[in-house]
Image (cartoon, rainbow, N blue to C red):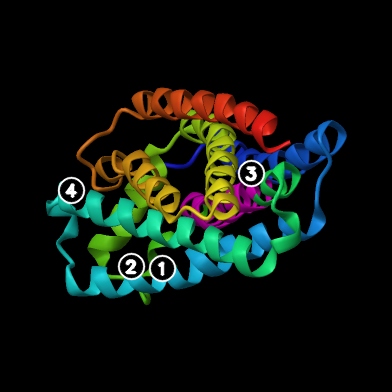
Amino acid sequence: MTMVSNVTIASMIGFILYSFLLFAGFILFNKRRTGISIKPLIVGSVGFIVITQVLEKLLHLVVITQFPNYADHPVLFGIYGGLAAGIFEEVGRFILFTWLLKKYLDYKGGLSFGIGWGGIEAVVLALTMTLPNIIFSFMINSGTFDTAMAAQFPSDQISMIKETILSQNAAFYLLGVSERFFALFLQIALSLFVLVAVIKKKKSYLIYAILIHAAIDFPFVFIQTGHFTSLWVLEIYLAVIGILSIFFIKKMKKSLQ
């Protein structure tokens, strides 16, 4: 019987712990360097959950229900996915800054908001994507997976879930470590970009933020639909985006302070 190795399971657990430590680490590091504003941190965290995990996912549910063969059209699906993420997240940031954070429209406020948004993203994605895999892995290793899942999913879907888990070794989750690290810098950079749009009252900047977000997200659809499988290329791409984000954050620190 094919089983999930203990090393892979340990890497899954390690990835979840890392996501919490990453969030806490960014808070503590920046608290010492520039200071952290608690309200923007909380608003950013709660805002991400409500906007992306509730509102945006409701839209995705409707769209995928209406277009079940979306994976056959990666370009169109990529445009839709990128624009949906860009509109929900960037407009969401804009509204939160405008309505709830009028007294925090400075670098520290924008940085705190971005850490809250990107930090909770790391935690939520780790829990929603990796925790079920840990449970499924123990079920596969104990031989109860097929029986337990039979009442909930058709046999072909059960086989697909099982094959996916078995194909994801420890390296897959270790790559996720660098992915979340650089993605957090991107979320901070986008938060500061939208903050500038609010401060300068230029909605054109908001449109730029949406388009930038959509363009960055577009390539991910080819991974999600199975049209591209090189995770190393994806990680290099994210690293480049993350490094550019760091430069942008430093530039914003000078201009906003």
The answer to which of 220 and 215 lies nearer the viewer is 215
Q: Is residue 114 visible?
A: yes
Name which of mark 4 and mark 3 comes first in the sequence. 3
Q: CA distance from mark 4 to mark 2?
A: 15 Å
- Which type of secondary structure does the marked residue at label 2 adopt? helix
In this rendering, position of residue 252 left or right of residue 109: left
Q: Which label sits in the foreground, 1 or 3?
A: 1
The disc label shown at residue 13, or none: 3
- Residue 64 in magenta stretch: no
The amino acid type found where label 2 is placed reads: His
- Tag 1, which secondary structure? helix
Q: CA distance from mark 1 to mark 4?
A: 19 Å
Front position in the image: 115 or 122:
115
In this rendering, is residue 3 above or below 80?
above
Cα–Cα gap, marks 4 and 3: 32 Å
Name the residue: 73% across, 38% down: 26
Residue 220: name its quadrant.
Answer: top left
User: Residue 135 in magenta?
Assistant: yes
Q: Which residue is mark 2?
A: 60
Circle 4 residue: 74
Hey, what amino acid is under mark 4? Pro
Q: Identify the residue at image location x=25%, y=70%.
A: 63
